[in-house]
Image (tube, rainbow, N blue to C red):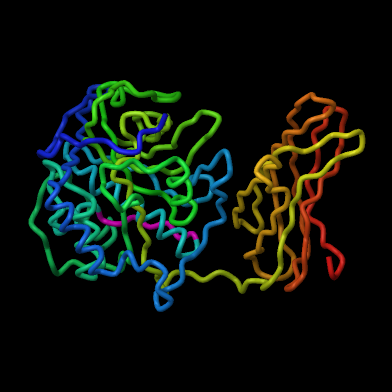
Amino acid sequence: MFPNSIKTTFLLAISVILTFEGIAQRTGLTPPSVQEDQQLRLSVQRLGVEDYDNPQDPPIIPLSIDPNASYVDLRQLNLETPIKDQGDCGSCWVFATLSAYESSYAARNNGRLVDVSDQSALNCSRGGSCNGGWPMRLTNWWIANQVALPDEQMVPYRGVDRPCTQSVSGQYKLLRAEYLDTRNYNNIPTVRQIKEAIARHGSIQVAMNSTPGFANYTGGVFRADDRSDRINHAVVISGWDDSKRAWLVRNSWGSRWGENGYAWVAYGANNIGAAAIWLDAEIDHNAPTPSPIASDATLRARLVTRAGGEVQLYEEIRLSINGKPYLFSLNRDQGVTEVKVPLEVSGGPVSYTAVATTVSRTNGQIRQRLGRGQGQIQINSGRNYRLAARYTNQSGDYELLIQELSPGR
């Protein structure tokens, strides 16, 4: 169902003008030749990007995202910056790359949202122009030259090609960037690979084939309307919804387009996911630091069998503790009946909110329940806590509470 590879025939500069509500919109993705792609990959290896687990590298900051979850929206985790508009310039390769970078920066710098200058990258990276470009050219230049890009206020976006002003520098450095599928950018990673990359790195940059149908998208799920092997547009995947079988895609055509600048694109539609790249922003030691973490405190959640023979089959939980988001799921069919989540919050009294959806079976009948809860609890280092359910009405909906477990449990 999901193609593993595509044969790219669009090796010339692409700058397709599309229209939406009378506004000219440009794509602008320029796939490299086979020879240049090999050179870019060799450059990545020389930069040490593929030596991902080098113990001397700065630590990777794990996100509280479960790749097994049926629904993820990084906007809800405060890992997405406001939508931008590339205008009448084929600079999607810049906007997609920097949007993925800004998501990684937020994940690795305590949720801090930044606005990096797209114009500076367009001017200086030699990754392309308003007539098209390629994201890996930009990321390799960024890493190899240890460039610190400025923010948007220092170099505002103009939507035209301008000379590079080398004297303009900022603070935003890129540590790593790599294709999800390292064999060839033409290969489309599996749905699972994309989910795992988002869970580890934040939003990822991908290519797709943008068509007039995609340009005129206004809502719902966009499904394949072109069966060719072309790619011509760079976008960002910022989440997924398995019930829709679709990716949450961030575009760079302004907030008037689509669903406030985003679209739901069916898995595999129009080659979505080709040339997928994850990025890791460098940790900014000047970023605000969170309160000290209560070390070794954990939260447990598990599937149960209730009185009357009701068996929980699946549960998806969204939890916020002092503003820190957590998202995880349990699935009896996959053998995941219990999870233990480290609590990355400061010790002392904390506030929490929780929402959960559970699917259970009783006497062969399947039903869905909804759980909600909020409150306060004292978190102590080294102690264990559990997410408990208290059923409150005949409909089967339930209240969620965080409770401290007895020592030794």
Please name whichever residue, 109 or 396, is drawn nearer the observer in this view of the structure: 396
**Where the N terminus falls, by quadrant?**
top left
Residue 170, how many percent across, how many down?
26, 67
Residue 112 magenta: yes
> Which residue is painted at 75% across and 39% down in the image?
371
- Residue 300, x across and y down, in percent: 74, 57
x, y percent for residue 218: 38, 23
**281 w.r.t. 382: above or below:** above
Q: Seen in the image, is 366 located left or right of residue 222?
A: right
Residue projecting furthest to the right: 307
Q: Residue at x 27, y 41 (%)?
A: 234
The span shown in magenta is 111-117
Residue ID at (44%, 53%): 202
Q: From the viewer's side, name the closer residue of 210 and 196.
A: 196
| Residue 11, image x, y percentages | 13, 39
Give the residue furthest to the bottom: 56
Hey, which residue is sitting farthest left in the picture?
163
Dominant SS type (magenta): loop
Report the quarter where the C terminus lies.
bottom right
Q: Which quadrant holds residue 270?
A: top left
Magenta stretch contains residue 332: no
Residue 83 is left or right of residue 394, and the answer is: left
Q: Nearer the viewer, residue 155 or 311?
A: 311
Whether residue 273 is situated above or below residue 338 in the rendered picture? above
- Number of dots carrying numbers: 0
Rendered residue at 70%/39% (across/down): 314
